[in-house]
Amino acid sequence: MASSATFDPLRLIALTSFGSGFVAVYYAGVVLPVRPAVVVLAALFAWGLLKVRVSQRSVLSRLLLLVYCLPFSATIGYLFDPSYLWGVTRLAVDYEQQPGVMNDLFAVATIGLLGLLSGLSAASAFGNSQGTQQPARSRREMGGLHTLAPGMYLLMLAAAVFLSWLAAPTATIFSAAYASEGTSSMAAELNLNSSVLVSYLIIILLLIDAERENARTHSRWKWWVTGAAVAFIAVAFQLSRGSRTIMGLFAGITCLYLTSGRCRSPNIHADADFRRRLRRIAVPLTIIVVLGIALGSARFLLTDSPESYSFGELFDKGLRNNTWTYLLLTNLGMAEEHASGRAEYLYGRTYLDYLESLLPGVITRSLGIERPLEADRGPNYWYQGLSMGGIHPVCVPFRNFGAGGVFVILAIYGFGIGRCDIGSSSPAFFSRFLYGSVATTSFLWFWYGDMNLIRCLMIDGILLAVYRVCCAPGWPTTIAQPKSDCRRPRQGNCEVVSGAIR
């Protein structure tokens, strides 16, 4: 029998105590030397992956831990060379060599990770201690027994493809360097920068609709047609044009795949099915990651002389100059400000800016309203000149409330992530949809700011309302009855539940 995720109060107390202790000594001016700090951060990350479980699989929690810690992989060289330099610009190297800056960077990162782990541990107190998945027995539990009819399904899928096209750069990486002048998307011109996120969340919604189909033929054609659309979007509108936002959608689809069907049951057969699915996707995911890393350099180099670079060279350049390394520059800028005494706290101003920027850009532009946060203004640009954009999740809390704020706010994030992770095994439509949505938004949230998560939740609410209407009685729909966990009728003690298709 597979072990279930249970709440461990001692673990929560220990993590909270360690986090509070780190905050206290940080305010006292005591920080670890760089090499021990690297070891502590890496050990906490590994321990969190192995030990902090909020659900049967904890796929989402582990994904967010990885996304949080991946930027710090650029600093592993300190273990072998105390004078190691990872910065990619002269200014970054200067900051690294200033006394106390890297110590400060690791101290805040460790406090944030302890907060994230504390929140995840607290979330496990509200999970299903038995780890069981109960079949849906009512319309309320299922979130509505109806699923989308073929015509409505294809219409929503077409809308997702259109929105991805709208957000695609206007030139490929073979004709113009990524983000160069004149390549901005139509969505950017309209100030509709969330269109790509809307597209991906529609796809997540459709995949959950497909997995709820009782008829195998209906479920299969929905999966296949959606997979074809995703492949088309990835090649035509993303990878060929230098954009890697599609990686978030791949993460969301992977999380749904690893937690669907029998994988949600707490038994040995579910464990075997989960491992089998991991083996199935291991090679495709590896290929996607390698292509994504190579694309990081290819999108700037191929326009010069495509034949002069091998794939290995592009991969090597992408590995050394990548998104997460550049993202770490925001932590470096924040640490330098604090170590030099130039840091000024905002005392919650950024979070008020979030509220004032809730209206979509296409609406505010038409009304002549200027939001505090825009595509070219906000936390992503706090360290412009040092960083090329993006913001690590510890930076906004630190700039607003200091180290204590980092621990508290990351704990809140961890609790929310844990609750979403627990929802992966729920029969309720919204729980599964929220789970897939947060997984899809994970990279954008932890690498490009909190507004991406806020937009995700707003879009989820709108899409859920649309889905409810499209699945309401009177609309052309199919009937989704609860599925059996068995693959064949009357296998063991299970029976296949039949359902009429209308």
Image (cartoon, rainbow, N blue to C red):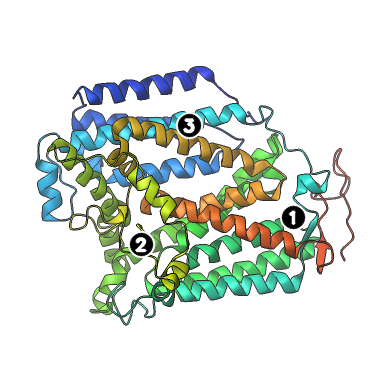
State the quadrant of the N terminus: top right
Label 2: which secondary element:
loop
Label 1 crowding class (10 Å Cα cut-off): few <14, some 14-19, many 20+? many
Specify the quadrant of the image occupied by residue 96: top left
Position of 498 relative to 197 (above/below)? above
Distance of mark 2 from mark 3, alpha carbons? 30 Å
User: Disc 1 or 2, which lies upstream in sequence?
Assistant: 1
Which residue is label 3 attached to?
119
For the question of whether residue 200 can be seen, the reply is: yes
Position of 34 relative to 235 (above/below)? above
Q: Which of 325 and 356 is in front in this view?
A: 356
User: Disc 1 or 3, which lies upstream in sequence?
Assistant: 3
Which residue is label 1 attached to?
212
Which residue is label 2 attached to?
374
State the quadrant of the C terminus: bottom right
Label 1: which secondary element:
loop
Left or right position of 398 against 34: right
Q: Where residue 400 appears, x then y in whole percent?
A: 31, 40
Pointer 1 with pointer 3, Cβ within 8 A: no
Tell me the kind of residue under disc 2: Glu
Q: Where residue 369 appears, x then y in whole percent?
A: 39, 66
